Image (spheres, rainbow, N blue to C red):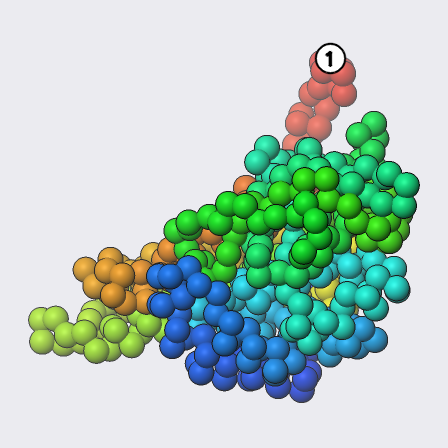
């Protein structure tokens, strides 16, 4: 029998290393957040307008290069710096946090699965912020069940012809490059799907329904339609069909710490507002921050936010230390996404409560914090899916705990044989 596991397995630990580059990028993001993101957040939210000024400032500061490797024009800073930058931007406006981070989500299929030629073709412009990116996976009838896609890409001569509709394309219309997941082999179970790049302006490609959303209103979420869209076969990511589902899952493992970081920023942003308000607002002759029930709320909000932050940093740090594709990354990414986004919702709800009637009014940004938080629990995999992923990993990892069998009641081990018949134990 195998001995007890060392403390490093199966939990997967990482040394969290904040490089000078990471700190510099995060500081730049915090500056841009206060100068370009926060002041216009209410207007962009109300009008459902993209914040181009902030995007240009992010591009000028080189922040879109955070997630692009150096050899393709980025800073190659990695997932932890990406999380720190996303958090800083989201602290001022959670919607702008996703407007930034979705470019990483759309680029990861190319970074993870693309050929060298494909990376050279698309990534340098993404790193400079000259081209925005979107990720087209979900469809009307395929959300959590990401393998149940119906959009097809059929090889005709030297071209793939894409037909069908995608739903919930974040950044649709703003983006120039779309990573599109489509069925290339309907007869295969495990190699059914491939990812292709479709560029804006390709005949037959259109942005159709621009959604009217509860939150994150400064970033468009649309339907993308593919009416016999022809792309050269060189646009098939990795130039090997059938790798799409794997690439989608690996992409989501890399991107979920980004949503989690957005959630940490969103929670911190709501807490910041609640703190300032609680110190200012007087009732019964004293600031409400002097009342124990309000203090309890503030203390819990801050503690949960800090716990979420370190789970995100730990997950992002582990990916940077070479973990992409490892099962432990998948579990940790799901944990970070699920925990941090639940925290963001709880903290935003409590922030509204602290603001009382004012919190319920759209005159103040705290109502927007609340509206923006909800989607975090839904997109890039619902928190139900995250819990399913976590539980699947835990159940597999339980195999590593054989040495604990001796502490389990014998009756529960032997009462039934594998076929359901009562054993003689
Ligand atoms: N990394 C690499 N490969 C993986 C993987 C991972 N994390 N997870 C699964 N796979 C592989 C498996 O090894 C298996 O490969 P083989 O067929 O070769 O054995 C294959 O993928 C199928 O795996 P499962 O049987 O586990 O797949 P499943 O059908 O049970 O689905 C799921 C698993 C976790 C539910 C997955 O479908 C999922 O993550 N769903 C949620 C999708 C999602 O997050 N959608 C959001 C899209 S983005 C968005 O929200 C919009 C936006 O723009 C922000």
The number of numbered badges drawn on the structure is 1
Q: Quadrant of the C terminus?
A: top right
Q: Residue at x 57, y 61 (%)?
A: 174
Left or right: 52 in relation to 390? left
Quadrant hosting residue 357:
bottom left
Tell me which residue sits at (54%, 46%) in the image. 208
Q: Is residue 126 visible?
A: yes
Residue 300, by quadrant, is bottom left
Q: Quadrant of the N terminus?
A: top right
Q: Nearer the viewer, residue 381 or 154?
A: 154
- Residue situated furthest front in the rendering: 203
**Few, some or many C-alpha atoms within 10 Å of disc 1 (few <14, some 14-19, many ≥20)?**
few
Q: Is residue 105 above or below residue 386?
A: below
> Is residue 22 left or right of 51 when viewed as pictured?
right
**Where ligand 1 lies, by quadrant?**
top right
Residue 32 in the image, given as x and y percentages of width and height:
50, 81
Residue 416 locus on image (x, y percent):
71, 19
Q: From the viewer's side, name the closer residue of 401 and 187.
A: 187
Residue at image coords 32%, 67%: 365
Q: Position of residue 342 (x, y in %)?
A: 47, 53
Tell me the residue at 70%/49% (across/down).
Answer: 203
Residue occupied by mark 1: 421
Query: Can you tell me whether the CB of the residue at mark 1 lies under 8 Å from the nearest atom of ligand 1?
Result: no
Point out the residue furthest to the top here.
Answer: 421
Q: Nearer the viewer, residue 356 or 64?
A: 64
Instruction: Using the rendered view, name the quadrant where residue 26 is placed.
Output: bottom right
Is residue 317 visible in the rendered image? The answer is no
Image coordinates for residue 224, horizontal then vertical, percent: 60, 46
- Secondary structure type for disc 1: loop
């Amino acid at each position: 029998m195998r001995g007890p596991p060392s403390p490093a397995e199966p939990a997967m630990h990482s040394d969290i290393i904040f490089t000078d580059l990471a700190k510099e990028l995060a500081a730049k993001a915090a500056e841009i957040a206060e100068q370009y993101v926060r002041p216009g957040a209410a207007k962009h939210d109300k009008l459902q307008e993209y914040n181009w000024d902030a995007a240009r400032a992010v591009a000028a500061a080189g922040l879109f290069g955070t997630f692009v490797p150096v050899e393709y024009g980025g800073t190659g800073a990695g997932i932890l710096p990406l999380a720190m930058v996303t958090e800083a931007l989201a602290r001022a406006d959670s919607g702008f946090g996703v407007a930034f981070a979705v470019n990483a989500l759309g680029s990861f299929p190319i970074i993870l699965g693309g050929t060298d030629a494909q990376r050279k073709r698309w990534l340098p412009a993404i790193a400079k912020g000259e081209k925005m990116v979107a990720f087209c996976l979900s469809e009307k009838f395929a959300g959590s069940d990401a393998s149940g896609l119906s959009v097809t890409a059929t090889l005709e001569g030297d071209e793939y012809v894409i037909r069908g509709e995608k739903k919930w394309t974040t950044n649709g219309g703003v983006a120039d490059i779309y990573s599109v997941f489509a069925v290339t082999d309907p007869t295969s179970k495990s190699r059914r799907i491939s990812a292709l790049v479709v560029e804006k302006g390709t005949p037959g490609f259109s942005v159709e329904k621009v959604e009217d959303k509860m939150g994150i209103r400064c970033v468009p979420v649309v339907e993308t339609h593919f009416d016999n869209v022809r792309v050269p076969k060189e646009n098939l990511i990795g130039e090997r069909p059938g790798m799409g589902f794997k690439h989608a899952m690996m992409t989501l493992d890399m991107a979920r710490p980004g949503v989690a970081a957005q959630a940490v920023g969103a929670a911190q942003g709501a807490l910041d507002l609640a703190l300032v308000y609680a110190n200012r607002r007087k009732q019964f002759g004293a600031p409400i921050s002097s009342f124990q029930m309000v203090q309890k709320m503030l203390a819990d909000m801050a503690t949960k936010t800090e716990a979420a932050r370190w789970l995100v940093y730990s997950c992002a740090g582990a990916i940077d230390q070479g973990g992409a594709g490892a099962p432990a990354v998948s579990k940790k990414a799901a944990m970070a996404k699920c925990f941090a986004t639940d925290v963001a919702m709880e903290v935003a709800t409590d922030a509204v409560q602290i603001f009382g009637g004012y919190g319920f009014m759209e005159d103040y940004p705290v109502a927007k914090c609340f509206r923006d938080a909800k989607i975090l629990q839904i997109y890039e995999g619902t928190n139900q899916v995250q819990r399913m992923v976590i539980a699947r990993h835990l159940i597999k990892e339980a195999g590593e705990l054989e040495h604990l069998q001796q502490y389990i009641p014998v009756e529960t081990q032997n009462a039934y044989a594998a076929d359901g018949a009562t054993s003689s134990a």
